[in-house]
Image (tube, rainbow, N blue to C red):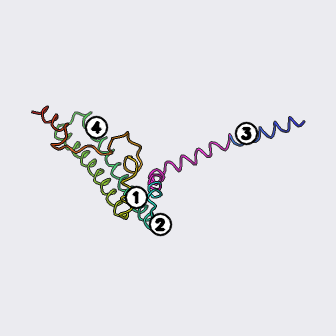
Amino acid sequence: MKHLTAFVIVFLFLSSQIFAAPQRMIEKRIIRRTPQAGIERPLLQIADRLELTDAQKERMHKMNTEFAKKRILLNADLKVARIELEEAIQKDEAKKDIDIKVKKVNDLRGLLFVLSTDERMEFRKILTPEQKTKMKNFPETAPFGRGVLKPGMSPYPPMMDESNEDFEEMEEEHE
């Protein structure tokens, strides 16, 4: 009888865990899919590492929300523009019409780049000089926690000037 009781208790415990697991997974998915959840996590890590004040965190959160809204709208416009471009190509429209659609796609991509640059500049305005120094000493990661880079890699492409060896090679190829 003791074995049967123990078996029933273990069975009930395990079955309750099995049925509770999907609910926890659903909750995690909901949290993960909200735009703010994916954005806030890296920013909170940065805020902790820089020891931001509550006022700075509030400004960062407000700024982040404003830029996220703009980014979402621009990304949606970009997706629509890419679909329109693909349709134009499939319909064999005139090159002039396709060029206009390509320009629209590139303009939207440029606006996204400008937006991300503006966001970085606004973020830096929030920081004190000490926090800016501390941020420079972070390990080499891409901006806003997009992953650790390999040693010697920069999160930004190299500038192409005369002192860059690749620049000289590219000039020779195009001559």
Give the magenta part as a residue range. Answer: 18-44
Within-10-Å neighbours for mark 3: few <14, some 14–19, many 20+: few
Q: CA distance from mark 3 to mark 4?
A: 54 Å
Of badges 3 and 4, nearer the viewer stands: 3
Q: Amino acid at mark 1?
A: Asn
Distance from label 2 to label 3 (Cα)? 43 Å
Read off the residue under disc 1: 64
Give the x, y percent position of residue 32.
Answer: 51, 48
Viewer-nearest residue: 32 or 59: 59
**Spot occupied by residue 85 in the image (x, y as percentages of width and height):** 26, 40
Check disc 4 and report the residue beneath it: 87
Q: Secondary structure at mark 4?
A: helix
Name the one closer to the observer, 39 or 73: 39
> Marks 2 and 4: CB-CB under 8 Å?
no
Residues at badges 2 and 3 in contact (C-beta under 8 Å)? no
| Residue at the spot 47% in from the left edge and 66% down from the top edge | 54
Q: Does label 2 or label 3 sit earlier along the sequence?
A: 3
Residue at the extreme right of the image, as rendered: 1
Q: Residues within 10 Å of mark 4 (few under 14, many from 20)?
A: few
Q: Secondary structure at mark 3?
A: helix
Real-space Cα distance between discs 1 and 4?
34 Å
Q: Amino acid at mark 2?
A: Asp
Read off the residue under disc 3. Answer: 14
Q: Nearer the viewer, mark 2 or mark 1?
A: 2
Instruction: Give the x, y percent position of residue 72.
Output: 38, 52
Q: With respect to residue 150, does 45 lie above or below?
A: below
Q: Secondary structure at mark 1?
A: helix
Q: Which residue is mark 2?
A: 54
Q: Earlier in the sequence, mark 1 or mark 4?
A: 1
Question: What separation in Å lies between label 2 and label 1 (alpha carbons)?
Answer: 15 Å
